[in-house]
Image: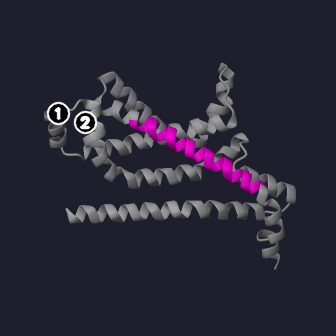
Amino acid sequence: MQLIETFFNWEILVRSFPMLLRGVGNTLLLGCASIVIGGAAGLLVCLMRLYGSKPVRLLAIAYIDVLRAMPILVLLILIYYALPFVGIRFSSFTSATLALSLVLSAFTAEVCRAGIESIPKGQFEAASALGLGFWRAMHKVILPQALRVVVPPLTSNCASIFKDTALASVVAMPDLLKQATDAQALMANPTPLIGAALIYLAFLLPLVRLVSHLEERGKRQLTAR
């Protein structure tokens, strides 16, 4: 009974639910913004990595390697706490979005690179023979085929980014974890943290299952070929 009253106190969970709900909205907004910005930036970095001039390619490689190696928490602290010393200040939401987007863009760039390089060179030659320019060939021929390969790992990266939104609590952004921590302190009971964990599970578990479904479908398509 003591375990239930301490960690699964229904009355406290109900009282803390409005706070948790506000945190859910901020978490979803942060995750979606990071995915959109990071995905678009990642595709751009990928094209720079593959088709840019040598200095541009080297810059893209350095960008990808550094950000893939750097923990998101370290990057977030640098953006939020270090940049003000050089006169650049961001809100907690902007800092978290920037940190998550930068890291996601690096991973997205590598995933997209692998997807594009998996397309046979004959497809590029055929697009060129049809008189399609580079961007039109990418849009009409290459990227639609590469999308089949990259969707499962990209979806997996998106799920990871949603989990990493919990790090935004470090810079006092009122995300789900920060709201749960505040509710725990206010009510002197860890039940709100359990509630937050259940909410994370509720919207991340479908994403995880979607990744598994996409991977299985990809395997079936390869086998059919």
Depth check: 66 or 6 in front? 6
Q: How many labels does the image show?
A: 2
Compared across the picture, whether 115 is left or right of 109 comes to: left
Depth check: 35 or 78 in front? 35
- Crowdedness of circle 2 by 10 Å Cα count: few (<14), some, many (20+)? some
Residue 69 visible? The answer is no
Q: In which quarter of the image is the N terminus?
A: bottom right
Please tell me which residue is depicted at 50% across the width and 41% down the height of the picture. Answer: 36
Compared across the picture, whether 191 is left or right of 123 comes to: right
Above or below for 164 versus 128: below
Badge 1 marks a residue whose secondary structure is helix
Q: Where is residue 93 in the image (x, y as percent from the top left)?
A: 66, 38
**Circles 1 and 2: CB atoms closer than 8 Å:** yes
Q: Is 160 colored magenta in this rendering?
A: no
Three-letter amino acid code at the position of disc 2: Ala
Can you identify the residue that label 2 sits on?
Answer: 137
The numbered mark at residue 128 is 1
Please tell me which residue is depicted at 77% across the width and 65% down the height of the picture. Answer: 191
Above or below for 12 versus 158: below
Q: Where is residue 181 in the image (x, y as percent from the top left)?
A: 76, 54
Three-letter amino acid code at the position of disc 1: Ser
Dot 1 or dot 2: first in sequence order is 1
Q: Distance between the Cα atoms at labels 1 and 2?
A: 8 Å
Quarter location, residue 81: top right
Q: Quadrant of the C terminus?
A: bottom left
Residue furthest to the right in view is 187
Please tell me which residue is depicted at 38% across the width and 32% down the height of the picture. Answer: 61
Q: Position of residue 153 (x, y in %)?
A: 40, 53
Which is the main secondary structure of the residues drawn in magenta? helix
Above or below for 5 versus 147: below
Q: What residue range appears in magenta?
A: 19-43
